[in-house]
Amino acid sequence: MRIIRLKEVMETTGLARSTVYKYISEGIFPKPVSLGERCVGWVESEVQEWILARIEERDLAKESLLGP
């Protein structure tokens, strides 16, 4: 298991800091893990799963547009 910091989360997802925290508050992005008093990180596999879910959503939407 690997913990990644916000900079890497932003680089991996392409999201801005404010968007990451907005999505967390909306419950649609993995919550960070406290690493200390003023330090948080994310479980890398959870962030990767979130990205894969976005790809699946895209592919399912494309399939529904094309029809059977």
Image (spheres, grey):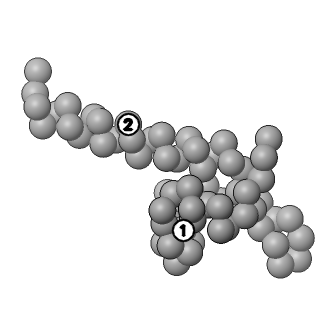
Q: Position of residue 47 (x, y in %)?
A: 60, 50
Residue at image mark 1: 20
Q: Residue at 81% of width from left, 65% of height from top?
A: 34
Q: Give the left or right position of residue 63, taking residue 55 as reference.
A: left
Q: Residue at 45% of width from left, 41% of height from top?
A: 53
Q: Is there any visible trace of residue 22 in the rendered image? A: no
Number of numbered discs overlaid on the protein picture: 2
Disc 1, disc 2: CB below 8 Å? no
Q: Residue at 73% of width from left, 57% of height from top?
A: 4
Q: Position of residue 29 (x, y in %)?
A: 54, 57
Q: Secondary structure at mark 1?
A: helix
- State the mark number for residue 56: 2
Please say if 45 is above or below 9.
above
Identify the residue at the far right of this view.
Answer: 36
Q: Earlier in the sequence, mark 1 or mark 2?
A: 1
Which sits in the foreground, 50 or 4?
A: 4
Look at label 1 and name its amino acid: Val
Q: Residue at 34% of width from left, 41% of height from top?
A: 57
Please say if 65 is above or below 21.
above
Q: Position of residue 27 (x, y in %)?
A: 53, 60
Q: Is there any visible trace of residue 64 in the rendered image? A: yes
Please say if 28 is above or below 53.
below
Are there few (<14), some (14-19), or many (20+) residues within 10 Å of tag 1?
Answer: many
